[in-house]
């Protein structure tokens, strides 16, 4: 059973893991910020690039040419479309030595596997994903926790991304009912946690989640690492 000083002990043990997790999340968000821009020209070429500036007459950008990133420009009238931050390099193949897109393996949220089973640090869960847009989905699910003996976990998340890599932001509730004050004095009403993290979900079914939970238990704020591995189908 948990004692009245359990929150303090948990914070001491798990704070180093939480700090490492936060560092990984910040590193991951930095990687996400390096997604490339897209320019489509009147010839039908789709170019992964970094758009530097746009004027009334030209679009100035940097693209890969002969394996080097070269600053260049295109007359604005020759641009049929452009979007910022929509190209993840791992999801595309390119013409040799260039950043001109040859083909795409990118999938929308409607193509992603909907059901997931995964094992975390404190729980075993099932979740179902409901797509609400090309790059947005909502998951709902629950499972069994072993934080202090068997218990119930309920959770919901928002997924942002596509193909295999997602940002995941959610809330989790562990209800604790019928507990006496002598053993759970600091945990009346259950545990509520918000989570931010990274989710990998491959087309073959492999699922990996890494993040940080910030839990609240009767006024105590407890950072907890979030690490899960499982299977999607």
Image: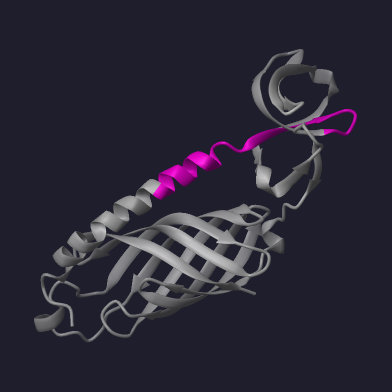
Q: Is residue 78 left or right of residue 33?
A: right
Q: Nearer the viewer, residue 176 or 35?
A: 35
Residue at left 64%, top 52%? 135
Where residue 73 sits: x, y (%)? 75, 17
For the N terminus, the image quarter is bottom left
Where residue 28 sits: x, y (%)? 48, 46
Q: Quadrant of residue 48?
A: top right
Magenta region, residue range? 24-45
- Is residue 187 placed above or below 23 in the rendered structure? below
Is residue 200 in the magenta section?
no
Disc tally is 0
Residue at left 66%, top 40%? 86
Is residue 29 in the magenta section?
yes
Q: Is residue 160 left or right of residue 20?
A: right
Whether residue 168 appears in this view of the structure is no
For the C terminus, the image quarter is bottom right
Whether residue 182 appears in this view of the structure is yes
Q: Quadrant of residue 84?
A: top right
Q: Nearer the viewer, residue 199 or 196?
A: 199
Q: Nearer the viewer, residue 233 or 141?
A: 233
Where residue 60 sits: x, y (%)? 70, 18
Residue at left 48%, top 62%? 209
- Is residue 180 placed above or below 31 in the rendered structure? below
- Is residue 173 placed above or below 70 in the rendered structure? below
Where residue 63 sits: x, y (%)? 71, 26
């Amino acid at each position: 059973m948990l004692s009245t000083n359990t929150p303090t002990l948990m914070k001491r043990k798990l704070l180093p893991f939480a700090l490492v997790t936060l560092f990984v999340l910040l590193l991951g968000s930095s990687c996400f910020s390096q997604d490339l821009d897209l320019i489509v020209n009147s010839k039908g070429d789709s170019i992964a690039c970094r758009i530097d500036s746009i004027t009334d007459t030209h679009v100035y950008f940097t693209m890969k040419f002969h394996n080097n990133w070269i600053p260049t420009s295109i007359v604005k009238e020759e641009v049929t479309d452009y979007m910022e931050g929509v190209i993840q390099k791992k999801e595309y193949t390119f013409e040799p030595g260039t950043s001109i897109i040859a083909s795409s393996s990118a999938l929308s949220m409607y193509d992603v596997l909907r059901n997931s089973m995964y094992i975390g640090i404190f729980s075993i869960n099932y979740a179902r994903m409901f797509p609400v847009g090309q790059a947005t989905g909502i998951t709902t699910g629950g499972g069994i926790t072993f934080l202090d003996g068997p218990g119930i976990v309920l959770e919901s998340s928002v997924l942002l991304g596509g193909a295999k890599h997602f940002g995941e932001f959610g809330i989790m509730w562990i209800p604790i009912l019928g507990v006496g004050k002598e053993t759970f004095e600091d945990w009346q009403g259950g545990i509520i946690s918000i989570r931010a993290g990274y989710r990998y979900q491959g087309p073959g079914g492999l699922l990996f989640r890494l993040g940080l939970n910030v839990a609240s238990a009767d006024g105590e704020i407890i950072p907890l690492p979030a690490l899960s591995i499982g299977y999607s189908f």
